Amino acid sequence: MNVKKIVVFGPGPKFKGGIANYTLSLANSLNSIDNTEVHIVSWTQQYPFFIPRDFIDKSSKSDPLEGTGIKAHYITNYNNPFSWNSTVSLIKKIDPEIIVIQWAIAIQGLPLGYIAKQLKKKHKGEVIFDLHVVAQKEPSKVDKTLIKYGLTNADTYIVHSYKTLDELKQIFTHTEYYVDETGKRSSGVNRTVIKLYHPIYDMFKPNPNFNIEEVKKELKLKRYVFLFFGFIREYKGLHNVIKAFAQLSKKRDDVSLLIVGESFWNTLSTNKVSSKIKNAIFDTAKRIAFNKSDKERDYQPLKLIDELEIRENVTLVNEYVPNNEVNKYFQVSDCNILFYLTATPSGVESIAYNFNLPSLATRVGHFPETIKDGFNGFLAEPENINSMAEVMEKFIENPLPRENVAASAKNFSWENYAKAILRL
């Protein structure tokens, strides 16, 4: 039987963040199917040189690809167009039947659009764009142009929610789509969209020997623990989480808020000349593209902890957590808080399913598709602090069976995701 070669393009495991974890998990799932040969083709630098942030994972020590047979090629530099041609040449040399490109941000439209266009000219493999998002969380004046250029040369799209499909239709208004949830492709002129989901990460597992009470004591946590996990960014609504929790903590003395994550824009030393130059260029670029300066770097929701006088009820781990330590924070928690302002399929929600952890979310984006109110979580009204505080209290008074979360998780397997890509 012929070996099916597959390229997954996206940030390799040397990078931080959900898309890097996703790229790795997708590669692993495709690699687990018989008669496949999987390559990760990765960025060396994902963004313009002046973005003032460190994206490399310097905390994790182990190599997640060891023993898998998956080959990682770090080759694509956003800032070096010659590397884009090298990327095309490498993929041609690998000669895959399928190329799955991770798409999450419009600014990458220039290199990804070029790479996809050249592959369509010079290679016969199916080009699939795996769309984590189309509409940008911080929209700029050039988004539509970059998205259209970036995605034009796809043979097939994968979306994780129908909301993302609607956003795609707003970009390509005259395109007819064939939508399928199993992986079947259109045999006609319509562009295929495979409607799937955000699968559950396979790299995070509960530790069966984990001593929950001991770690809760170490972290100074009370009876009920509400977890906010992940990069601290404004669209994730941590400011609202803290305000809602403050209301709850006035009523109860047995609750804790556990905040675990790195402040997204605070990874570089502010004293370095290079950081100051990057910040100056980045702020100028933001003013041009967004008609405003970069206010998110001034986003400091953690100040609310002291302003609202809830310090004794909050445990803060304000740093990047390597994958091998993630289980610790989910296993000591009772539920996962996702009070986002806007939402695309969430990696943090996916992690929570590994631990059968219910999620409390705002009724935005895809959350109503995956979180069934009163079954595997509760939904609050967006930007409504009272509603958020109410669902936190409701969760305590009406505990949800973990079996419900486990039942929901069965719908989001990597195996079925990979089989849809491979048409199995």
Image (cartoon, helix red, strand yellow):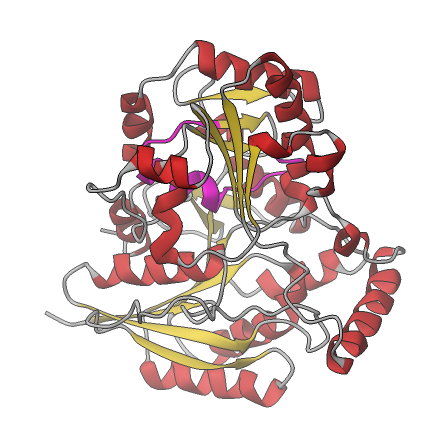
Whether residue 196 is visible here, answered yes or no, is no
Whether residue 420 is visible here, answered yes or no, is yes
Up-down relation of residue 288 to residue 298 (above or below): below
Instruction: Please name whichever residue, 86 or 193, is drawn nearer the observer in this view of the structure.
Output: 86
Residue 399 placement (x, y as % from top left)? 39, 14
Q: Residue at x 61, y 78 (%)?
A: 78
Residue 408 is covered by the magenta coloring: no
Residue 256 placement (x, y as % from top left)? 52, 29
Q: Residue at x 35, y 86 (%)?
A: 93
Single out the residue that lies furthest toward the top.
397
Residue 378 placement (x, y as % from top left)? 49, 20
Report whether 253 appears left or right of 290. Answer: left
Report whether 184 appears left or right of 284. Answer: left
Single out the residue that lies furthest toward the left.
1
* Magenta-tinted stretch: 339-359
Report whether 143 appears left or right of 375. Answer: right
